[in-house]
Amino acid sequence: MFRKITISLMSLILIFPMLVVSASANDFDEIEPGVFINKLSEEQISEVNGLNTLQRTDKINTEYLGRIVEELTLYKTEEEMQADGTINKYEYYHVKYKDSKEASLVQEQISSNKAINSNISPMGFNNEEGDFRLVTTFEPLVEQTKFDSVSKNLYSNLAAKTYEKYFSLLSGKFISNYIIGYFSSEMVSDLIGGLEGRGDATAYFRLAKKTGQIYHNGSFKSYFVAYQQEFYWKHETITYNKDGSVKRASTMYYIPQTSGVSYKPIHWIYSHYFNDNTKIAEVTQYQYGVEPNRSVPINDYLAYEGYRNDWSTIGTMSY
């Protein structure tokens, strides 16, 4: 179980300024205050996919995008948690098709398969051939290596120093708020009183996936997967007595969904269509139209990298 230590933000603000520091990389665009996004180059896309454990296919034909789906209407949602902590969210949509040859191809495939499978009892009586759903999967968080730390330091040093985490795909790095801001108010009082403190920053990783599925031959089958790599962190803090013994120790987890408080990632890398449900639906529909019995879905490719310079941002990302 993660243990969350509550910090009084107001008390910290009264003691020191909570300043935000920007990253040193210059290739990122600020899309909203404190949030930066970079579009990956072809070389970076190849590099990250070479290290990725997910199966990767060549870039898919996308000439049909914008020609299939007129409108998606959400009509049902479901959620489940697996034994290993994986979370699956199911969203069921009615699809309104455009008047195009690409959309006709999909609709003709649905009609043809309905005729062939008319005598098959569906596994879900509320579903029929051609129905579309989007499955968003959050894999469990995995603790990674410590990426930065400060040894015994006085208040003046901790108030002027930041943590550094290197980009996964670029040569630059991004930096945190001042380290003093991640100590509890009691620990800050220790430091102001002349005691020394230590901090350790450790990364957490999880994979989020969006899978486009079509109901075919009595069950939902996967045709397209888009994904996002997300990095969170924890901060372990210690203050020491004059004799070197530990006075206080605490750990703060800046991760999603813990003790009623969720934090946004500090760093993330996402595939080309991860944030566009309509395009995911169109790729899924098209793949069903041209190859309804394919054995494995095709994978989207990583295309963007982002970071935020406030590492304690409460909330969840928009999926």
Image (cartoon, rainbow, N blue to C red):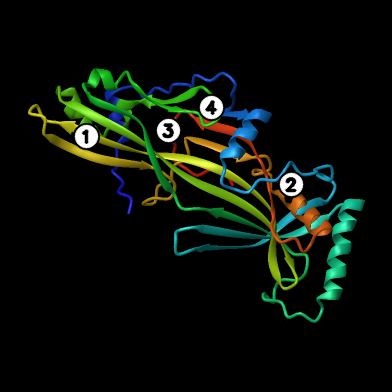
Which numbered disc flags the more N-terminal residue, 3 or 4?
Answer: 4
Q: Is residue 83 above or below residue 56?
A: below
* Callout 1: SS: strand
Furthest residue in direction front, as rendered:
50
Classify mark 3: residues with Cα within 10 Å, few (<14), some (14-19) or many (20+): many
Which numbered disc flags the more N-terminal residue, 2 or 4?
Answer: 4
Q: Which residue is mark 1?
A: 238
Which picture quadrant has residue 248?
A: top left
Between 217 and 311, the one nearer to me in the picture: 217
Amino acid identity at mark 1: Ile
Q: Is residue 185 left or right of residue 85?
A: left
Which picture quadrant has residue 26?
A: top right
Amino acid identity at mark 4: Pro
Q: Which residue is mark 3?
A: 311
Which numbered disc flags the more N-terminal residue, 2 or 3?
Answer: 2
Camera-nearest label, 3 or 4: 3
Q: Which residue is mark 4?
A: 33
- How many angstroms separate mark 3 from mark 4 (CA)? 13 Å
* Callout 4: SS: loop
Q: Which residue is mark 2?
A: 279
* Callout 2: SS: helix
